[in-house]
Amino acid sequence: MKTTAALKTHYLTLCIMTALSSVSLSTYAQQSESQAQENKEMETIEVRGIRRSLTEALNTKRFADSVVDSISAEDIGKFPDKNIGDAMQRIPGVTVVRTFGEVAGVTVRGTAPEQSMVLLNGQNVASVGWFDLGGMNRSFNFEMLAAEQISGMDLYKSAEADINEGAMGGTVNLRTRKPLNLESGTVYASVENSYHANAKTWSPAYSGLVSWKNDDENFGVLVAYSNEESKVYRETLSNFGPAGNTTFVDTNGVERQSYGAMSSILFDEDRERSSSQITLQYAPSDALSMDLNYNLFELENSHVNSAQFAIVGFGQMQGDSVVVNDQGIVTAATSLASGPGLAPLFNNTVLRTPKMQTDALNFSVNYNADTWSADFVVGRSNAEGRTLQSSTWWGDITDTANSSFSFDVAGPLELIPTNPDYMSDHSNFALFQEFTFINYKRDNTIDYAQADFTFQLESGLFTSIQAGLKVQEQVFSSQGDFQDLDVAAAQADNLTLADFNGGFVSGLHSAEGRAGSLSAFPVASTAIWDYAHKNKPSEITVKDAFSIEEDITAAYVKSNFSGEGFRGNIGLRYVDTDILSTGSINGEPDKINKSYSNYLPSFNLAVDLSEEMIFRFAAGSAISRPDYDDMKVADIISESFQTANVGSPELDPYKSDQYDMGIEWYFSPSSIIGATFFIKNISDYIEQTTVKENYPGCGPECLVTRSRNVGTADVRGLELQYQQDFDNGFGIQANYTYTDSSRTNSAGEEVPIEEVSQNSFNLSGYYENEIFSARLAYNYRDDWVRQYNGSSLDSMNDPYDQLDASIVWHATDYLDITLEAANLLNEALVLRQPKAGNIVHSVDEFGTRYFVGASIRF
């Protein structure tokens, strides 16, 4: 592993490169002249509103050498959607991943969210997940970002040598605003109130931005802040475990295959998200400019996860009540309590108080000499996540007949208590089974230094040469501090839910639920925290602790070329990665080193078939590094069950050879018809496998689950894009993506790639004039493979569509009034298990959200 001293050596190397280049490269023309000429070729944009935003984005795409799609904010605070991810779903080739209503990640061209990368002003952003059951991956969570401070974003779909490696799907670069690009004295402020239809609550939000520059326009300061409170309200019906993997003997002595458990769940979260930005710019001359930029993103999402569980194995399945489907799976039955000590129908309350923050500090210098130009960046990004969690089980273990139940999983889950009155009294639910108190800690730090040089060539096919070096040191660490309470001592206090009465919830599952389902049940209050804090043991048990250090050195060279009717670039990026994984195996401390190098070529070509029509071709190689979860040195062993879950620090990254070919017709400055065909051939695909091994501490016949480089994957697809401004206030934006994707697993079987839909499309129409603008946006994706609650790859999500709307009234030249709605039709996510007879495995309902706000700018 490289030490801090080694990192300092890299900084010194950058300085030496600067000095050498200033002496030896005196034969090249100034880059700024070329940029000015390029700007002359780009069409001037003078329109306003939605049309302006779409036209600016289209302009970026049109004049790019590579395969790029963009989204542009018309003005401060006027990003096209409420969420960065919501806006990205309007881009061809992109589908979004929704876990709690808002977009948390994006799937780009048949790849998982963690296989794309998010940059902020061209640099990596540290990230940690807030959810203890969520994976620890490299994908930045879009839920952290407020849209108000983003001026635009670019999605790079093809490889380029000067862009950070690590994205097999696409690289998203988010751009913030700079004071020297705004008028001095610019002030923006907004207020908003949002209403969640299912939760029936209002939540406020506000934001502001001030930008100033001096009379010489060579020094400027920008300060921005936004704060948003919101209600996240997810209603879930769920069966647990793959159907058929759990076997019970009913009262008639017949062996039955059934789900082991089912539940009605309410995830009730109060979320607060804030974003801060401070940017200083100084340009003492036309040749030299310096930027200092700091961003801070904070997210707090305290929540109560209340689940009314039914455990089939805690009771006796009545033989005469059993109904099975064609696959022999029990779809309906009555389960009666089998005796004291277990409560088949019980309440599980999980309280969490996640607090997560990410910051990024960058100092950049740009110098344009007479014959060359150089850019330098030094920065650091930190992410910290802290999640306190307490989990309790509540039920009647003395008179368990109260918690007998009937169930029907033939459609969305129907769960019927035998004694409904039992559910109406909190005092009927006594503590049993567990009382956990855990603090999950995750930290991620990225230090980086980068130097980029551009040399203009005076003649010939190649117009310029770019070269650069970047060094990064990334550290990710995680651990769980357990201080579980003494359940027997808590039971001796005769605790019941009445001691932590959080009221009742009712009216759940209106979108997809069944009439007999548990749509009402008692819930606990956050007063459980007080008891947990007072009674937690002083001794802390640390579990699943590990850290991963990565030293990454990348160097590239890239040549830009152009001629009569064509332009493009060809380049090579070399990346060297050194890894040190630290943790423990079988209770003993352990360290494992891993190193690998990659050569990543790239080629991009744009040919002007006419003044309005462009043909594009791109080819290149990319990598995506394994998730931190996969790379950890850690194991969880169950000797009694002869199982072990083991990390895999010696994994290689995914590798992808990818190709693009497309044609674009720009029949007006704000209109396009385009088609792009893409291919990705992926090797070293990472799969989680379970095989028998002689594993220390577990035994010679241990079932070991770990991740391995065992497969390949192929992705082929077609993107179609249509956008038109009709010059009468009306406009339309539409795209369609067909993705044919599959991977070969460790058994040699061809299986679908998770989270990938074969067909998806987006359609939005708008109308605007000088007084108001309105937009209606619809997106659709067909079914896709999704894991949920331990389900295997035979779980398939139903097609999902969503309708959003927005109206803006330009009340004055300075004041806008907005009204927006998300998920107007209250669509739910429905997961099925086809191999079990297409049983509905889970239903997640998020509800409709409305937003009303006002903003001023002067």
Image: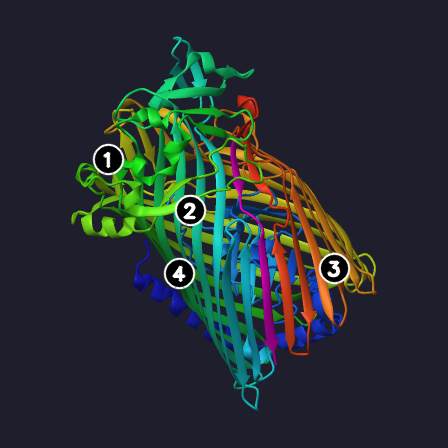
Identify the disc placed on residue 357: 4
Query: In x, y percent, where is residue 638?
Result: 27, 29
Q: Residue at x 39, y 16 (%)?
A: 248
Q: For mark 2, does the 10 Å Cα neighbourhood hold few (<14), some (14 to 19), or many (20 or more) residues?
A: some
Q: Residue at x 40, y 50 (%)?
A: 303
* Magenta span of residues: 841-858
Residue 526 visible somewhere in the drawing: yes
The amino acid type found where label 1 is placed reads Asn
Q: Nearer the viewer, residue 770 or 154?
A: 770
Q: Find the distance from the CA under tag 3 to the CA under tag 2.
A: 50 Å
Chain-order first, disc 2 or disc 4: 4
Chain-order first, disc 3 or disc 1: 1
Q: Closer to us: mark 3 or mark 1?
A: 3
Q: Find the distance from the CA under tag 1 to the CA under tag 4.
A: 33 Å
Q: For mark 3, does the 10 Å Cα neighbourhood hold few (<14), some (14 to 19), or many (20 or more) residues?
A: many
Q: What residue sits right under mark 2 in the picture?
A: 596
Q: Closer to us: mark 1 or mark 4?
A: 4
Q: Which element type, helix, strand or loop, lies under badge 2?
A: strand
Residue that extends furthest to the top in the rendered view of this protein: 253
Q: Nearer the viewer, residue 192 or 404?
A: 404
Q: Find the distance from the CA under tag 3 to the CA under tag 4.
A: 36 Å
Q: Closer to us: mark 1 or mark 2?
A: 1
The amino acid type found where label 2 is placed reads Tyr
Residue 368 visible somewhere in the drawing: no
Chain-order first, disc 3 or disc 4: 4
Q: What residue sits right under mark 3 in the picture?
A: 766
The amino acid type found where label 4 is placed reads Gln
485 shown above or below 792: below
Q: Which element type, helix, strand or loop, lies under badge 3?
A: strand
Identify the disc placed on residue 586: 1
Q: For mark 4, does the 10 Å Cα neighbourhood hold few (<14), some (14 to 19), or many (20 or more) residues?
A: many
Q: Nearer the viewer, residue 304 or 754?
A: 304
